[in-house]
Image (spheres, coloured by chain):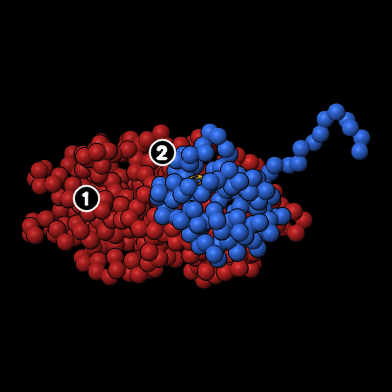
Chain colours: A blue, B red
Amino acid sequence: MIDFGYGISPSSAINLERFDRARFDRLCAEEPDVLKCMACGSCAASCPTAGHGNMNLRKVILLLGRGCDSDALAMTRSCMLCGKCLLVCPRGINTRHLILSINKIYK
Amino acid sequence: MEPKNQQKNIVVIGGGPAGIEASRTLDSLGYTVFLIEKEDRLGGHLARWDRLFPYGTPAGDVLGQMTASMGRVKWFTGTEVTQLNRLERGYNIILSNGMSVLADALLLTTGFSLFDASRKEEYGYGIYDRVITNADLEDWFSGIPVPAIDSPRRIGFVHCVGSRDEKVGNRYCSKVCCATAVKQACEIKEKFPDAVVYCFYMDLRMFGRGYEDMYLEAQKKYGIIFVRGRVSEVSEDKDGHLFVKAEDTLAGKPLRVTLDLLVLMAGMTRNTAVAPIVRALELSTMEDGFLKPKDSMTQAQSSYAAGIFYAGACTGPKTIPDTVAEAKAAAMSINEYLRDND
Ligand SMILES: Cc1cc2nc3c(=O)[nH]c(=O)nc-3n(C[C@H](O)[C@H](O)[C@H](O)COP(=O)(O)OP(=O)(O)OC[C@H]3O[C@@H](n4cnc5c(N)ncnc54)[C@H](O)[C@@H]3O)c2cc1C
Ligand code: SF4
Ligand code: SF4
Ligand code: SF4
């Protein structure tokens, strides 16, 4: 490949056209509460990795729901499954279990 | 009931929920009530809606209950006010049916107009075939054919169309359209269970009792996808599909999607049909054109003019329960006014 000295980064736009919902639907079937997330950000705010890693459960849920799987999964790698987010989620989502299911379904 | 109240005439202009409810209450207080509606049926916008948020109550049932007992109210449809004069005490009102009434008090319940969605050209209402409004969708739910709705598989709802928009001169929130969007999203998903349904919102204003439950049900039971971001533009491909651009502000990324149907949540705007009355009586309006009450806290039903009162959406966007409560409050304000000025 010729090196022009610069590159075009792949588009970071969300294109719902190319989103194959099958895997997300499987996640919803196993973790129906994932649909209840109202993007409040409590989970991300209370996460002990905040400021160190890039785990942000609010964003993980959102990005999986938009077909941006690799961005989402890059985040879950910093999670240490401490379960703190579970204590603060106002929608009562079992977030820790959800993260485990994400890791299983998207592995 | 004061027997002498019967000698007092009250003219109510506008036969929507506010006018109907206020007329019935004033009638039960013994007053002689004339209710004037310019359209050929009572009910105002309520007569056009199919089911109401948040519980899906049929609008026809609500209207039926309201109009079941109009008492001695003299109501006239297809009738307008042709002339209005202020007298030393009260008002002289001449109607298009030739009647003339000497009114001791006047209640304006002239309601709102639906925002003309074609003014937001970037959304393509009136240009692209598959762009419709919330009101068009209510028509379809009521059984009126809407050709744009042809087994859609991808459906979008756009919140805040003509509201929270200084460019069209409406800075305010229309209050009812978030709840309407969520209600309609669930209803259309029920009709087309395989469709993917998106709501594009800036803030979700689910303030009322039962609204948050409706939102939760929309997410969990119906799988409605909520995207926080204002649709910036819509274009049409050669097959008539709609290409939609927005920012997914929670992801911080631009978002693109193609849809088969786009429903615009047209907001509530001032009703220009009240303009001649405003001019004749020199009433005050707010900068957005809605009628201005004397005091928004404690005298929301009073105007600046003696003997003229307001109820319902003529003073700003309101739900039906708000409107009905104001109608009752206006009847009490009129009752106090007539008692004190006896
Ligand atoms: C898309 C949409 C859906 C909605 N759904 C719901 C819902 O599910 N639940 C809910 O609580 N609320 C809902 N609303 C709000 C509801 O429609 C209003 O609260 C209600 O209609 C206000 O009643 P009103 O009597 O003040 O005004 P209107 O309903 O506008 O009635 C005013 C009446 O006055 C008449 N009039 C006006 N000027 C004159 C004149 N000069 N002479 C004679 N007659 C005149 C008009 O013809 C009209 O009949 C919805 C609103 C919208 C836009
Ligand atoms: S479980 Fe993971 S995402 Fe939740 S607070 Fe702990 S580290 Fe953060
Ligand atoms: S705390 Fe719960 S509702 Fe809030 S963003 Fe996290 S998962 Fe969603
Ligand atoms: S109720 Fe919702 S959709 Fe309507 S103007 Fe307000 S924020 Fe926008």
Query: Tag 2, which chain?
Result: B
Image position of B273 with respect to B216: above or below: above
Q: Residue sitting at 59 percent across and 47 percent down?
A: A76
Q: Residues within 10 Å of mark 2 (few under 14, many from 20)?
A: some
Q: Is mark 2 within 8 Å of ligand 1?
A: no
| Mark 1 lies on residue | B329
Q: Position of residue A104 (x, y in %)?
A: 61, 59
Of helix, strand and loop, which one carries label 2?
loop
Q: Is residue B339 above or below residue B320?
A: above
Residue A56 image position (x, y, % from top left): 54, 43
- Identify which residue is drawn at 52% across, 61% down: A31
Q: Amino acid at mark 2?
A: Gly
- Mark 1: amino acid: Ala
**Residue at coordinates 7% horizontally, 57% vertically from top-left?**
B2
Chain under disc 1 = B
Along the line of sight, which residue is nearer the eye, B146 or A88?
A88
